[in-house]
Image (cartoon, grey):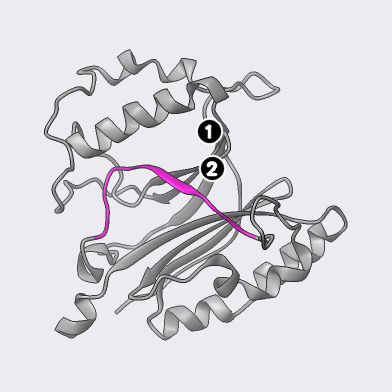
Amino acid sequence: MNASANEKPIHRVIARAQLKPGSVEEGIRAAMEDVSGRRRIESGQLMTFGCFRWERNLFLYAECVGKKLDAEELLPIMSPYLELWPGHEQKRLWIPMIDVFHFNEPACPDHWKRKTEVERRAGRVAHLKPEMAASYIYYHYQLQEERAFHGPKYEIIAMHENLLFGYQEFPAIVEAPVLPGRLDTHGTPEEWKDSRMDLHFQPWPDGHLYFKQVETLFAYYGFE
């Protein structure tokens, strides 16, 4: 890889959409058969690209190289199958999700490319209690920027409303970030269990707490 290519930033894009009630199977099939993501990877525009499903919700995860692309550009074939989200003057098909936690972040393409084979790329979802969302972000931002302890390099958690979506890779790679943290404080609890994350999550109907794995429609990677 030449020096100029390695100077390009990596933008992590996470977005949420909802399939129309009568278009679920068609929409799933269209996403799985779409080849535009593979072409963008082959052209060097993307490093990783994945789409995940939970019920009628779709979650897009992309690592854009150089130029940040939005979800509509990344999966244009999905437009006929998605519901419109209100809230803006021009209604949207995909809602950008807010990055609320990551252990690591890309410094450059060479730092972010996978050095070992990834066996599985996965998505997971959970619901926060709405009244605990601010506390969840507070604890996680503190942990993230104080570099209190290290965790999976490529894992990231994003939020829309009180819904959390997490992207993961297995086996997990744990390494220290190369970029400095943004906080000089030391407020993260010495024992993470003291943050009482169990009080932050909304239980599932079956009583399960925390995250549940969701269906992977596709997950591609390619970078040289």
Give the residues drawn in magenta, as a range: 94-106
Q: Nearer the viewer, residue 138 or 34?
A: 138
Residue type at tag 2: Arg
Q: Which residue is mark 1?
A: 211
Element carrying mark 2 = strand
Is residue 223 toward the left or the right of residue 42 in the image? left
Give the residue drawn at x 58%, y 38%. Answer: 161
Q: Is residue 76 above or below residue 101?
A: below
Mark 1 nearby-residue class (10 Å; few <14, some 14–19, many ≥20): some
Say the numbered circle drawn on residue 124: 2
Magenta run includes residue 96: yes
Residue 124 seen by the camera = yes
**Quadrant occupied by the N terminus:** bottom left
Q: Residue 200: where, in percent of width, then height?
A: 48, 20
Which residue appears farthest toward the right when viewing the image?
A: 22
Q: Residue 80: where, in percent of width, then height?
A: 78, 70
Q: Residue 120: where, in percent of width, then height?
A: 46, 55
Give the residue drawn at x 69%, y 75%. Answer: 77
Q: Is the C-beta separation of discs 1 and 2 under 8 Å?
A: yes
Which residue appears farthest toward the front when viewing the image?
A: 89
The part of the image, by quadrant, that contains residue 119 is: bottom left
